[in-house]
Amino acid sequence: MGSSNPDGRSARDGAGWRPSRRAALTGLAAAALTPVVAGSALGAAGRSPAPRAADPDLGPHVHVFDPATPASEIQAALDSAFDTQERNQFGTERVAFLFKPGTYTGVDANVGFYTHVAGLGLSPDDVVLEDSHVRVEADWFDGNATQNFWRAAENFHLVPRDGTNRWAVSQAAPLRRVHVSGDMTLWNGYDGWSSGGFLADSRVEGAVVSGSQQQWLTRNSTLGEWAGSVWNMVFVGVEGAPPHHFPDPSHTVVDTAPVLREKPFLHVDGAGAWQVFVPATRTDSAGTSWSGGGAAGESLPLEDFHIAREGDSAADLNAALDAGKHLLVTPGVYEIEEPVRLTRDGTVVLGIGLATFVPQGGVTALTVGDVEGATVAGILIDAGTTNSETLMEVGTGSGGGSASRPTALHDVFFRIGGAHAGKATTSLVVNSPHTIGDNLWLWRGDHGSGIGWETNTAETGLVVEADDVTMYGLFVEHYQKTEVEWNGERGRTYFFQNEFPYDPPDQSSWSDGGTNGYPAYRVADGVTTHEAWGLGSYCNFTDDESVVAERSFVAPEGPGIDFTDMVIVSLGGKGTINHVINDLGGPAGPTENDGIFYLTSNH
């Protein structure tokens, strides 16, 4: 994904703007990150502190602050990280900043690549950052935020210094469990693009202004106001969402989320003990999980977790899992020489600081057995240079998974190419029924190192074989064949964003039998029930602009197959998509419909 400024037209009003061009994309390098010593826990002035649990050793890339940490020390750590991480798009440095409960004043966290900022309260309101910012800018790329990937912030109450906080991001940059006492903007504020994002379990008291954001999912949140739309804005279970209206403005609104489990998170209790809170399953929900007081779920003591540090092998991780431990994976890049295997019900694998697994020798990086209630969260899987048939598998198809204890994947990202010449036939296979995906980005790289039609090869992003699988925020881009194959019954997708591969060298190299191109999202023949809301698919055939995709979406016809609110776009007129779904809608191309076509339903 990557874009240029749009024909000199302003997007400052945040509504009704239609960009049309993209720029060339480049890989970036960066220097090494110098660790900063974390603040220590101190008692209140004038009192002897009560005995408290010792802080765990989370390694040199995790920095823990409490309200007694000098503000200058906090800011120096944040600034040092940003100096390294601002342009470090494909580097190996990873860092996390964790704030213990209390109030902090004047924090300015400019969040760069592979940087994670999180509060350690049980509620977001337990960590207050007043007169502060936790922000993402795009100054490094001349205001273009379309490459602001791989970063995260969660679980704090932010009172913005000037009343507004900027989070100008694209894919793989989630904002979760935040309470913002002010406004929030999702773009850089001048003529620069931003291209996709995810906000969940959050409250924004003021207005969210989307500006040049091309597409965005807001899930289970409370907003004071939403302003703006470009192509595909989706709201699921959002209090204060704008009215459902598509395509102008392009607002798709679903009143409740049918089933979900929020992402687990670290917290520190009143005695200083570290725990991981695992939220319970919710059904037909709207609004945040925490606004009414304590959220439903359970806290697991950190003693139940193996704390993985950079240098741990897959054998080390599996030994801990076999011993009954969960995994807390601290920031780093982990070479995975055998699959990391989850074989017990309820196992949690929680990554912080964009912890990255790189499979070696063509292995699958991570497998989840036929279990109930497993969780994988906060992990980037970066394909190795030897082809992996799959990067991650959930279930074997022999059982496991239940409606009451679904397995959940939160902020799990897949990358093939960019950092090196990665290869993987399929990124993610879901065989376990009732699995929930919550903000997944599956990306065959279109820029960086190791990029090329014959270099970073990858056929399919997601294959769903199981029934009753639900996806919230599914981003799948640039794969060389059908990008999503959905074979299970009663599947549901709430927000889908796709780009076809940029680099087919010619039409014959990218044809499905006698059909031009491959679909972005295919529901298999024989499936009788499937629903999808808010789907966008774009082409940008930069190597051969004459390439054609016959259609973006393919699905059987029938009363149980419902696709609501779809858009196809020819970016800058580079290529053509003939139809939206099956033989309906379209075309979008250099001379057709100004390069864009909307369709509200497949019926």
Image (cartoon, rainbow, N blue to C red):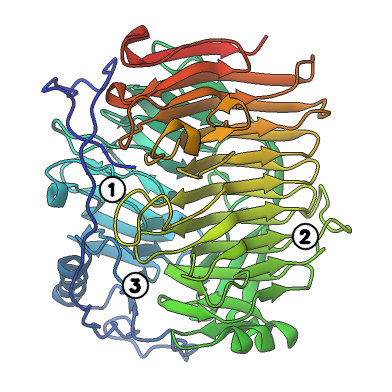
Q: Is residue 259 visible?
A: no
Residues packed near mark 2 inside 10 Å, few (<14), some (14 to 19) or many (20 plus): many
The picture places residue 22, in percent across and down from the top left corner, at 24, 33
**Residue 154 as seen in the image, left or right of residue 285:** left
Compared to 253, does 285 lie above or below?
A: below
Residue at the spot of label 3: 94
Residue at the spot of label 2: 395
Residue nearest the observer in this picture, 580 or 305: 580
Q: Across the whole image, how many numbered discs are drawn on residues?
A: 3
The picture places residue 313, in percent across and down from the top left corner, at 55, 87
Q: In the image, what residue type sits under mark 3?
A: Arg
- Earlier in the chain: of badge 1 and badge 3, it is 3
Q: Residue furthest right?
A: 398
Q: In the image, what residue type sits under mark 2?
A: Gly
The picture places residue 235, in percent across and down from the top left corner, at 51, 29
Residue nearest the observer in this picture, 273 or 358: 358
Residue at the spot of label 1: 147
Element type where label 3 sits in the image: loop
Name the disc covering residue 92, or none: none
Compared to 291, does 584 lie above or below?
A: above
Mark in the foreground, 3 or 2: 2
Q: In the image, what residue type sits under mark 1?
A: Gln
Placement of the C terminus among the 4 image quadrants: top right
**Residue 515 as seen in the image, left or right of residue 120:** right
Residues packed near mark 1 inside 10 Å, few (<14), some (14 to 19) or many (20 plus): many
Mark in the foreground, 1 or 3: 1
- Displayed quadrant of residue 254: top right
The picture places residue 596, in percent across and down from the top left corner, at 38, 15
Q: CA distance from mark 3 to mark 2?
A: 30 Å
